[in-house]
Image (tube, rainbow, N blue to C red):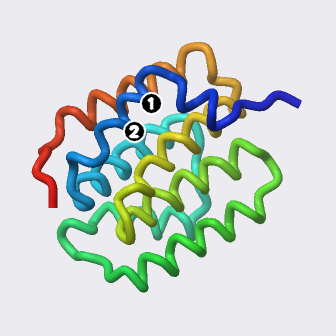
Amino acid sequence: MKKITFTTIEQMPDVKQIKDLLDIYSKETLLTWATKCFSNLLEYSSINPEANAIYEEIQGHNNRPIPVPIARKMSLRVHAIARSMVEEKDIYLYRALGHTIATIHTKRHSYGCVLYGVKALFHMDHSDITIPKFTKESLVLLTSMETIKK
């Protein structure tokens, strides 16, 4: 069975840069960024209606802030869905969403969207072209966002 480790992912140049840049952004900015990164993953796969409803609620976070306790429940629910999946591509896709949601709690979780997103793409057999495209798009998106730290 094929595998890609987090160590391998973190050695990718774009992923390294993303990790190095996270501290200069606010939690709100990183939530917006991770949400957009996750939407890029949905070009290659889909999520179930329950997770999609949660994702849609997160997309409106800037207009309707979600309290941390509610976001935590949402994130844990998505991670529970991930545990119920059989295919690794699905497990990692739901984990990417769970980390996107968990950004409401702490901004470092936003990085999990990229890490698990790469794992999901790898297990979808999109590794040669799509993974570098996804990581580059994620980096470009991040560097184009407001850098006011809160």
Residue 125, picture quadrant: top right
| Cβ atoms at labels 2 and 1 below 8 Å apart | yes
Residue type marked 1 = Val
Residue type marked 2 = Lys
Residue 119, picture quadrant: top right
Structural crowding at the residue carrying mark 1, measured as other residues with C-alpha within 10 Å and reported as few (<14), some (14–19) or many (≥20): many
* Above or below 125: residue 123: below
* Above or below 18: residue 107: below
List x then y, in percent, for residue 30. 29, 52
List x then y, in percent, for residue 79. 63, 66
Relative placement, left or right, of 85 versus 11 is right
Secondary structure of the residue carrying tag 2 is: helix
Q: Which residue is mark 1?
A: 15
Marks 2 and 1 sit apart, C-alpha to C-alpha, by 6 Å
Residue 101, picture quadrant: bottom left
Farthest residue in the right direction? Answer: 1
Structural crowding at the residue carrying mark 2, measured as other residues with C-alpha within 10 Å and reported as few (<14), some (14–19) or many (≥20): some
On-image quarter of the N terminus = top right
Q: Which residue is mark 2?
A: 19
Which is nearer the eye, 79 or 126? Answer: 79
List x then y, in percent, for residue 102. 45, 66
Secondary structure of the residue carrying tag 1 is: helix
Q: Residue drawn at (60%, 74%), measured in percent from left and top?
A: 77
